[in-house]
Amino acid sequence: MKLLSYMSITDDTPQVGILHKTKNGIIPLSIIDIDYKNMMSVIEQVTPAEFERLNLAQEVPDIPTIPLSSVKLCAPIPKPPQDIICVGINYQEHKNEADCYEPDTLSTKEPYAIYFSKRVNKTTACGETIPSYSNIVDSLDYEAELAVIIGKDAKNVSEEDAEKYIFGYTILNDISARNIQKRHTQWYFGKSFDGFAPLGPYITTADEMPLPLNVSIKSYVNGELRQDSNTGLMHFTIPHIINELSQGMTLKAGTIISTGTPAGVGMGFNPPKFLHPGDEVRCEIEGIGTLINTIGN
């Protein structure tokens, strides 16, 4: 099942719906007499019985739907309650290109996962513009990533039980200002500018993407294929990440964990292929969809 947040043309309040499996349309939760005002409420409060009703509704042939073309799509979680947790250098080939670009700043020689947070006041929806900050950023980069949405509070979770705590998956484009990363010799600031967290377009629920995940992940810039990999090539798996993080912190329902990007980002080319105003970036993950954004001035 694919869930999404959207706004009608006449109302700027995000609503939640599900994508019909065969129609190109949205089923509002109100059609199914389920009353949740936003995606966080669904994640935190939906009951197994309600979840089953939603699953059944997406296949009803004559159920009323709203055409996607008649609404504005929002990021599925427009305002995350916490910073996004990110995993750095989680694909070997990306580690290699990071080592070549800036070994002291952007990579590591240690055999442990790198965790960092990405400040997000508001996520960027599919179709929205990513600001370029061209007055201070000269090396704007893209990173297609699979993002995990935690479905219930997780503490001291074993790898074997990790899947039970996953609500679903979406796409994150971890936009990065490489010169800011290098200048400050850390990742937080250069990845946390306003607008640097495109997310969506949908959340695909975990029942449709069982672990272990082996799905394609790609990115394109102006139609040119840049990243082409598979989530099965992650060095640290999703169960490992949830297990490790939950030993020291409670992962609250709605927590977003972005699992790293494969090779093919702009800094990995010689010379680098960074983003410029007017560029279109497409991030695709099999089973979720396509996240499309344009770089602004």
Image (cartoon, rainbow, N blue to C red):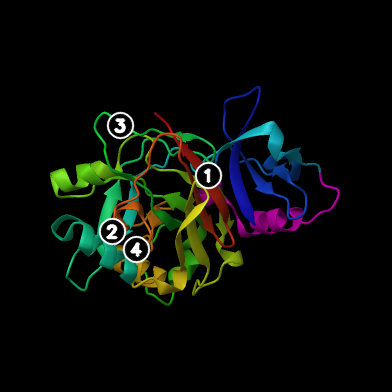
Q: Amino acid at mark 1?
A: Ile
Q: Are marks 4 and 2 in contact (CB under 8 Å)?
A: yes
Indicate which disc, 4 or 1, sits on the residue closer to the N terminus.
Answer: 4
Q: Residue 14: where, in percent of width, then height?
A: 57, 33
> What's the CA distance linking mark 3 and mark 4?
42 Å
Q: Pick whichever of labels 3 and 4 is earlier in the sequence.
A: 3
Please state the horizontal and vertical placement of residue 16, each as a whole percent of the image.
61, 41
Query: Which residue sits at x=40%, y=52%?
Result: 255
Identify which amino acid the numbered label 3 is placed on.
Ser
Q: According to the image, label 1 marks what residue? A: 292
Residue depth check, mark 3 versus mark 4: number of the one nearer the observer: 3
Q: Is residue 12 above or below residue 217?
A: above
Q: Quadrant of the C terminus?
A: top left
Q: Could you tell which of marks 1 and 2 lies nearer the N-terminus?
A: 2
Q: Which residues are magenta?
A: 40-63
Q: Are marks 4 and 1 in contact (CB under 8 Å)?
A: no
Q: Is residue 104 left or right of residue 201?
A: left
Q: Give the side of residue 251 with respect to residue 103, left or right.
A: right
Q: CB atoms at circles 3 and 2 under 8 Å apart? A: no
Q: Which residue is mark 3?
A: 134
Question: Are circles 1 and 2 on residues that touch, CB within 8 Å?
Answer: no
Q: Which mark is residue 249?
A: 2
Give, as a three-letter code, the residue at label 2.
Met
Q: Is residue 44 magenta?
A: yes
